[in-house]
Amino acid sequence: MKKYLLKTFFRIIGYSVLLTFIFTLIIQIFIVEHGEKMRNCYMPLFTEIIFSGFSLFISLASITIFLTFFKKIIHNDIFSLLSFVLLPLIASYIILLFLADEEGNYILLFICALLFPVWVLIIWEYYKFNKIKKNFEK
């Protein structure tokens, strides 16, 4: 079970950071293609790196999946779900508070590019874990 959860943890981190970087890059290309200049932005890939860092922060918060080593948590479906989503949910809220002050027409697209890959991967990995959890409970 340790090996499976470790792979799950690194899959969440790797894929969410990569997908966030790609989605943010696509949004940046879309903004530039539609003739809007990026105001006060002199570094290429700056926005992509910042949002990938936010994604990394949320993904690292999913370290609580290792709480499923405890029998009390793995046998209770609510605790098992909370071990996957509670701390990433708090991390997402902190980042949304940080991004709430941002101005711009496309900030909602950037927030979606940040949260969508992370949360789809977390929910997908929980779904896969829930399906094979019966093997680990023995």
Image (tube, grey):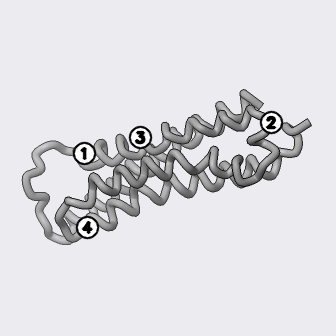
Cα separation between marks 1 and 2: 44 Å
- Kindly identify which residue carries mark 2: 71
Q: CA distance from mark 1 to mark 4?
A: 16 Å
Q: Position of residue 40 (x, y in %)?
A: 7, 52
Q: Residues within 10 Å of mark 1 (few under 14, many from 20)?
A: few
- Mark positioned earlier in the residue sequence (1 or 2): 1
Quickly name the residue at label 4.
106
Identify the secondary structure beneath mark 3. Answer: helix
- The secondary element bearing badge 4 is classed as loop
The residue under label 1 is 45
Which residue is at a point 69% across and 35% down the rendered structure image?
5
Which badge, 3 or 2, comes first in the chain's sequence? 3
The outermost residue toward the left is 40
Mark 1, mark 4: which one is toward the viewer?
Answer: 4
The quarter holding residue 78 reads bottom right
Q: Could you tell me how far apart the alpha carbons at marks 4 and 2 are, in whole angstroms?
A: 45 Å
Which tag is nearer the camera, tag 1 or tag 2? 2
Query: What amino acid is labelled 1 in the image?
Result: Leu
Looking at the image, residue 77 sits to the left or right of residue 25; the answer is: right
- Looking at the rendered image, the disc whose residue lies closer to the viewer, 3 or 2, is 2
**Secondary structure state at the residue bearing disc 2:** helix
Report the disc number at residue 57: 3
Could you tell me the amino acid type at mark 4?
A: Tyr
Left or right: 20 in relation to 117: left
